[in-house]
Every structure is written in C-alpha cells, then in structure tokens.
Image: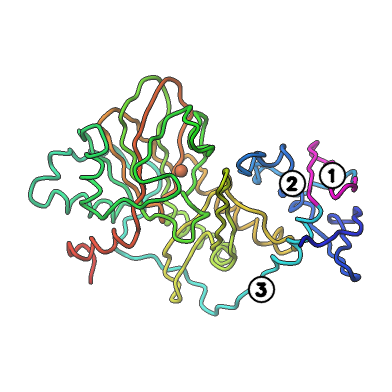
Amino acid sequence: MATRIRYAEIVDRGVRIGFGSDERVVELPSRWLRDHGDGPASVDPDTLQRRVDTFTIPTDVEPLELAFGDGRLTLRWSDGSTTQHDAGSLADLIEDRRRPWPPRADRTIRIDSDLELWVGDSGPFSPLSADSLDEADGSRQMLSTLHRRGWVMIDGVDAGQSAVEKLVERIGYVRRTIFGDIWELAPGLTEHLDSAYADTDLEVHTDCTYSHDAPGLLLFSCQERDGDGGESVLVDGFAAARDLAAESPDLADALTRFDYPARYVEPGVRLLAERPPLRVDASGRLRQVSFNNYDRAPMFPVDMWVDTVIRAYSAFHDLIADPARQIRLGWKPGRVLIFNNWRLLHGRTAFTGGRRFLGCYLNHEDLESRLRVEGIVGA
Ligand SMILES: [Fe+2]
C-alpha cells in the first residue's frame, strides 16, 4: 500500500517532504527530483521509457514553484521545465530504495588481459565472409575475434531465419525473451513499443538492463536496406571503464557499488532488474557493463545520488557518448553483426528509407563455453 505524503515545501537544496503516519521528514535533492518526474514530459506514458536527458540537467537546478494536491506534486524549475510526481510513489521510493554503501577495501578494477580494448575507429576492417566460416578454423577465427574485440561482422550471409540459426549454432543457441526467438526489426512494427523500433537516433546503451541475466550477445542480420543513415554505433564499455578508473577512481568505484534499476513495460509485461553499471566479481574483475538511460527506473532519493551516484553515471556517460570512442558500421543485405552485450554499448544513427533486420540474443555463458571448448580461453 502506498505511503502517504503529508506535506511538501521548497527548501534550500530541494524539496522537504513529510510522509508516513509518524513525523518522518526527508529532503529530496533538486537534481534528483528534476530527473525523476513521472508526467508525460518525463516519461513515455505507455512504455515508461525516460524522456528526460539526465545529462543536460543543470547541476544547480532549483525548484521555483511547488504545487501539491490530489496526490500529485508539480514543480516548476529554474531551467524552465515542469515536472510532475505521484506523491505515493515518491514516498514508496523514500521508504524502500535507500541503499547502504557496502565497504570493499580493494577498489581496483581488473580487466582480463587477453581482451583487446579499443577506443574509436582503429582503421579499416575486413568483414569475414560467410563462406570462410566453413573452412578449417573458420568458426574459430570468428569466435576469437568476437572474444578479443567484442564484435565481429560477416558478409554474404543468406537471407532468412535458417541462415541466422546456422550462424548461432556456431556459438550456442537462440536465447528466447519477451521479444521471441529470432525477431524482426523494422520501422513501423508495432508489436513492441520499444524505441529500438523507431527511426530516430538511438544513444549507445546495452540491451536488457531490466533482465537479471541480460543476454551476452546480440546478433543483427540485415535483410533489406535502402535509404540513408542507420549506421550501427559501437563503443567498448570495458575500455571506457578502464579509462574512468584511471582518471577518477572514486567515480569508477561508485559504479561498481550501487545497483541501478531498470524496467521494461508494455501491456502484460513489467520487467524490473537492477545491478551496478560496472559489475565486478569478488576479486574486482570486470564482468559486465550495463548502461541504458532510456530504461533506467527511479532510484533512491538521497543526497548521495546527486553527490556520487549520478556524478559517476554522468562521467561514464560522457566517455561512452564521445564520438572519438565510437565506431560506425554501415549496413547492406547479407551483412551480420554479432557483438558482446556485456562489454560493448550499441546505438544507431537516424535513418531514412526502409530497412529490415532479423535479430536474436544469445547467452553469455554459451559464448564462454564455446571459447573454452575451442581452446580460445583456458578451461
Ligand atoms: Fe539496443
């Protein structure tokens, strides 16, 4: 049952809320509130995907006016925006989302030395040919490239689902999700409401931050293409993590300690999961990058969010959004891209014309298994 908010008032660094049946009072930081509206200016009403650009909110944003009634809080801000908030949801967040700061003495982030981290376009690359995969060592070369660099491109792949299945079998098997097994991606498809189905720019992200076990690999197979734009954008998230750790160890460390929640909503579906953007194992070895600001769910409203959590998240965003870190890959029918969704971030430039892809997910554990079986990594 939703907790009740009794009053709300503007104070020096945000908004003071009195809530619950006793005398509990909490001050919500300005930047957090500005980021966490739930009205149509802040989130898409159907999918709840965020419309707020977290990273352009002025750090000194302040509330100018507050209205509270009918269970809704409305705030007008110094940057000209207005946000709305369901008071019951705010109170529930205050109650439930506080997180401790777990101590960890060793703050080093280690990255496996056999990975070839990259920053931006390192010159021309040659896609593998589909025919070469049938040659001795062909599959092994594909797997080795995928492992070291985090992505591989293959040209000359036949159209249709069975060619995708054949390729997937060289690694593992298709991971079924709410999107199905092998799904179709084209503008105008309305089966799912996700922004991936539009034709606009898509900022780099990892997929399925709302899944406890996000798929480890993503495969796109271009079936049809005419028009301009629509390049795939890739960024090496492990290289960005390494560089953030070198520049700002405190911020990189924070990204390993806080769970960032994410959600996916459509009729009949409400997925919710959370994990740190940089997931390390107990020894500090980086295992997974998770970052998708479109799908991020509300986070706990404490000063630490402004002082550390969002500062760390923004610093990582600044790195991965830097065009100098990106590679851009164009498409033509018969071209397939497979990449590691636990390491690389992907996006897409806006496009015109028609295009149709088949896509699917694979599990990370099956890639790891195949790498061991092929002797590419140690058993
Ligand atoms: Fe995506």
Sequence-wise, the earlier of marks 3 and 2 is 2
Q: Which residue is mark 3?
A: 100
Disc number lying in front (3 or 2): 2
Sequence-wise, the earlier of marks 3 and 1 is 1
Q: Which residue is mark 1?
A: 75
Sequence-wise, the earlier of marks 2 and 1 is 2
Residue 325, given in percent of the width and then of the height, sits at: 44, 44
Residue at image x 45%, y 21%? 352
Highlighted range, magenta? 67-86
Q: Residue furthest left?
A: 136
Residue at image x 43%, y 46%? 235
Q: How far, Cα to Cα, is label 3 from label 2?
A: 24 Å
Q: Are marks 2 and 1 in contact (CB under 8 Å)?
A: yes
Residue 113, given in percent of the width and then of the height, sits at: 32, 65
Is residue 182 in the magenta section?
no
Q: Residue 88's quadrant in the figure?
A: bottom right
Q: Is residue 242 left or right of residue 217?
A: right
Judging depth in this view, the residue of 38 and 155 nearest the camera is 38
Amino acid type at mark 1: Leu
